[in-house]
Image (cartoon, grey):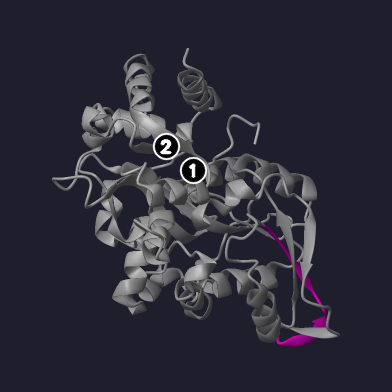
Amino acid sequence: MTNPLTQTTMSRASMLRLMAGSAATLAGAGALSSCSLDSSSGTSAQTKTLTVAIWKGYGADLPWVAEDFKAKTGATLKFQYIDSSANQLQLVAKADGAIDVALPNIQYVGAGIEQGIFHELDTSRLTNYSDIYPEFAQRAEIRQGDALYAIPWTWGSTGLFYNSKEVVPAADSLAVLWDPAYKGRTALIDDANVLVPITAMHLGQDPQKPDMATVTPALKALKDNAKLTYSSTDDLAKAVSSGSAVVGIGNSDGIGGLIASGEPGAADLVYVVAKEGAVGWIDNWAVAAKTKNLDLAYEWLNYMTGSDFLEKWAETPEDASPAPANEAVAGSLDADTLKRLQAQPDKISELALQLPQPDAVLQSWTDAWTQVKAGS
């Protein structure tokens, strides 16, 4: 990913986004059938194909999804794979109606609204809207005035993890990442959009408005303390298994998945939202403004945010689900599943959400981290 504004928090589906590379090709899922039922009109129509812009391997393109959605709607799915959030907006705009629905992070919904890319949503047609955590559903970033343009789907955080047998006493502060006692035993996720806000929180600053003059030296000290800067869960898992990484920054669902994996050392991991906070994210479904399949797009949003899909996804560990934004679904999951997903709704208010930032600001974060990694 060469775009400096690319969001690579590795916070979705255990970093499958990053591993997707630049796979921006169409992939069909399911075969055409002779007809489908338009649920809004109740009339038989020619088979429709819904084209969905998503990250590869991120839930929506699981093999059983196309079959299940077709059984419910008679419709075929196609996936346009994306390699960055900014790239997704460009794809939807250039598709001119050939892409029906997209999956923007909350950091990018506003830009899509301003560019006229997304369709205003009628909440009366969103069957699961009332079950979405109100802290998410009421976010100003997915609205323009009173008009809603996206419905929250999954959420999580990127924060502190540690090995409970090696880090004593138990860590509850980001300060442990700078502790000389763990020099050469710390793992950092390779993402300026996470590490800059984390460092700002450590310094007591506003993570949305970090003072880079003081953040950059602290970021260098953080990097100097690290053994590993990683960009895949495989690399992190190896470091955890070997004992070379006992504390670090990771994504909530990724660490939860490691804990449940049975890998050596993983069962001793603990993920926490430190007392200074953690970086949070919300992924949302949005409908393309020029879609020619509006009724079908609503059916997709309702299916994706509903219990049939979300519960099955969450209860299948190998499918790497994040926490659902549907509060009713989260309430139906057992304790072990919730722990694996790191669904901690009581911590939502403590998260510093990745919110829209001027291009120049994100570029300055990327430049600072690039220079720190290069040792300059």
Q: Are marks 2 and 1 in contact (CB under 8 Å)?
A: yes
Residue 194 is marked as 2
Q: Callout 2: few (<14), some (14-19), or many (20+) C-alpha neighbours within 10 Å?
A: many
**Is residue 138 covered in magenta?**
no
**Is 50 covered by the magenta stretch?**
yes
Residue 278 lies, in percent from the top left, at 32, 43
Q: Is residue 217 left or right of residue 7?
A: left
Residue 9 shows which numbered tag?
1
Q: Around disc 1, counting alpha carbons within 10 Å, would you say few (fewer than 14), some (14 to 19), or many (20 or more)? A: many
- Magenta residues, dominant SS class: strand
Which of the pair 1/244 is nearer the observer?
Answer: 244
Residue 319 at x, y percent in the picture: 53, 68
Identify residue type, mark 2.
Answer: Val
Q: Nearer the viewer, residue 200 or 75?
A: 200
Which residue lies at the image location 42% right of the left edge and 61% below the top edge? 257
Specify whether 271 is left or right of 372.
Answer: left
The amino acid type of the residue labelled 1 equals Thr
